Amino acid sequence: MNVVRFRYFLFFAVILLSLTVPLNLSARYNRIAGVTMGTTSGFALKELEVYPQKKPISGVLKDKNGNTMRGTPMVLGKSLTQSVAFAQNIENWKTIQNNGFNTIRVCWVDPYYIDRSKSGWTVAEVLPYLDKCVENATATGMNLIINYHNVGAQQNYDKTYQFTLENEFWTAVAPRYKNNDLVYYEPANEPTFTMSDYLKPEFKTNYLKLYTIIRTLAPERQILFFSFNGITQEIIKVVDHYSPQIDWTHTAVGYHMYNSTTSEHIRTVMAYHPVICTEWFYDHLSKLPGNEFIKRVDGFKLNAQTLEELGSGWVDWRDWGDVTLNELVDTVITDARAKNYWWGQPVAGIKATGIGLSDKKIELVSGKSKKLEAFVYPALAENQQIIWNSSNTKLVTVSETGLVKAVSSRDATATITAKTEDGSFASSCEVIIRFEGR
């Protein structure tokens, strides 16, 4: 009888253990994600209970080729003639592509002007310009995010949350490109700056109606939803609140790298859903009045580095009338190469068209060194070789990797030149040497 009892005991113990293991896994998953069960600071309990049995759709939005999306905006607007011409010219798309970027975020900004009683295109009038952008995307193979671009519209203008013009726009646009797998839809840019607005029943109802229109008219297109104006803790609660009504196989959380110095909250969202950053702005602009929302996130000077550390796709931002690409090409690529987060690889057949140099003038005390960074334009040019030269090696030397060393025994000035092997494009840096010896 003792043996029989022991066998029964062992049988029931195994059954009990099998029932408790999933609960322990759920709790462990919960701790890893940084979410507390039973509170409003994280995702709902019902969602967490499913995840141990079914792997969540999480991480980052990738394009159809499985690549991280990196890009820059182009702007369409009736009064922005130069910006429109820039977006329509396919050569600008090729330039961006040849510098290591695969995504364009086309922003229709007339809703911003219309709200302020200024002139803007109607939906019907902007469609031919969108068609040309889609044509350029198709010809180059680049990803295209179509963005209805207003700023805080539902907070300041559409105070009853009707999304009237958004509905009109997407009713026309969503079916128009529904079969183009290079195209992504971003329904509304930063619709409100107040996170609690997202949780108001009337806001949520009408915002989800807009989502349903797009989803119904273009079932296979990815929707970049929310376009939050920051990565504060409140975004977790908002996403959780909407989550049951969202088709996460064709939806990603859009966010902007503003108003917080930490990425921890977007990391929490990434544990459950795909994400993409559709805006970040440059650190040197954070000093300007009104730009306090621009933050260094996780201690990195450029948000691009933070986003590369996260593994998140991203699009930078610039003023609507800026078509120079200076910051995208010079600032980002120089920083990425200097700090070893550069993602680009040379492409056969792309010829050099110029060269960039990190410094135009430096000062060195004799005996000291400084590394200069040079890179070929475009950034994906096949031949990346740089030839370095000093105008006077008795004053200053330079290594084949751009390490400059002052060797003069007196105050002096010399020039360091970097030249591309392909095409002999050159750029120079003046070196002022201070001799502090006897």
Image (tube, rainbow, N blue to C red):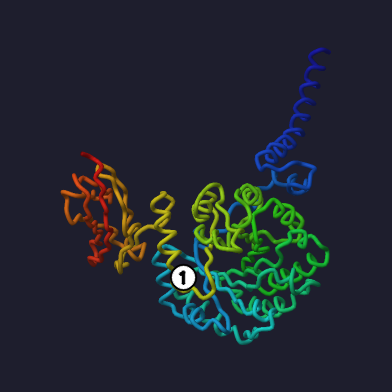
In this picture, residue 174 sits left or right of residue 297: right
As displayed, is residue 346 above or below residue 133? Answer: above
Circle 1 packing at 10 Å, graded few (<14), some (14-19), many (20+), is some
Q: Quadrant of the C terminus?
A: top left
List the single residue furthest toward the top. Answer: 2
Identity of the residue drawn at 27% across and 50% down? 401
Residue 231, by quadrant, is bottom right
Say whether residue 183 is left or right of residue 249.
left
Judged from this view, the residue extending furthest toward the front is: 438
Q: Amino acid at mark 1?
A: Gly
Query: Residue 90: which quarter of the image?
Result: bottom left
Residue at the disc numbered 1: 141
Q: Residue at x 27, y 53 (%)?
A: 432
Question: In the rendered image of this protein, does residue 118 appear above or below residue 413?
Answer: below
Give the x, y percent position of residue 303: 52, 55
Q: Is residue 387 visible?
A: no
Q: How many marks?
A: 1
154 and 104: which is toward the camera: 154
Q: Position of residue 7 (x, y in %)?
A: 78, 20
Q: Name the residue: 58% across, 58% down.
A: 294
Q: Is residue 20 left or right of residue 376?
A: right
Identify whether 190 is placed above or below 15.
Answer: below
Q: Position of residue 343 (x, y in %)?
A: 43, 55
User: In this orientation, does residue 428 appear?
Assistant: yes
- What residue is rendered at 53% in x and 66% in y? 317
Rendered-image quadrant of the N terminus: top right
257 or 65, which is in the foreground? 257
Could you tell me which secondary element the residue under label 1 belongs to? loop
